[in-house]
Amino acid sequence: MAKILLVEDNEMNRDMLSRRLRRKGYEVVVATDGAEGVELSQAEIPDLILMDMGLPVMDGWEATRVIKADGKTEHIPIIALTAHAIAGDREKCLAAGCDDYDTKPVEFPRLLAKIQTFLS
């Protein structure tokens, strides 16, 4: 069973995504801010990270940079999740080290396809 770290500060998004992912057979570890996401990435070594970019304490861009700079976690694919869908945001997420990008509100089948691509 693949382990996914979900870094999301919005409780409704966090609950919905974690329930749907668990129903698909994934183990889900949850962080509510970027600093906790970095800590859990190092402690849990997930197979994939879903990273909200607009997080408290440490934003998703900085958390991604820290995770990708650590030799222990640099290999973990990170999919950015953001409500920001303006020109340049995808590039900004990829420049921070994210491996892919998806917009909110999450279209679950599309996100699931991206997850499966990284985990296959």
Image (cartoon, helix red, strand yellow):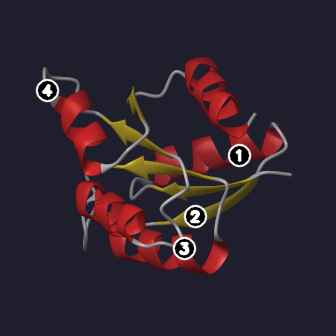
Q: Report the residue marked by disc 4.
A: 88
Q: Secondary structure at mark 3?
A: loop
Q: Secondary structure at mark 2?
A: strand
Q: CA distance from mark 1 to mark 3?
A: 28 Å
Neighbour tally class for label 2: few under 14, some 14-19, many 20 plus, Cα within 10 Å: some
Q: Choose mark 3 or mark 2, whichever is in front.
A: 3
Q: Is residue 33 visible?
A: no
Neighbour tally class for label 4: few under 14, some 14-19, many 20 plus, Cα within 10 Å: few
Q: CA distance from mark 1 to mark 4?
A: 31 Å
Q: Is residue 28 visible?
A: yes
Q: Residue at x 33, y 69 (%)?
A: 66
Quadrant in the picture for residue 41: bottom right
Neighbour tally class for label 1: few under 14, some 14-19, many 20 plus, Cα within 10 Å: few
Q: Amino acid at mark 3?
A: Lys
Q: Report the residue marked by disc 3.
A: 72
Q: Residue at x 19, y 38 (%)?
A: 92
Q: Position of residue 107 (x, y in %)?
A: 52, 21
Quadrant in the picture for residue 63: bottom left
Q: Residue at x 60, y 42 (%)?
A: 16
Q: Report the residue marked by disc 2.
A: 30
Q: Earlier in the sequence, mark 1 or mark 4?
A: 1
Outermost residue to the left: 87
Q: Amino acid at mark 2?
A: Val
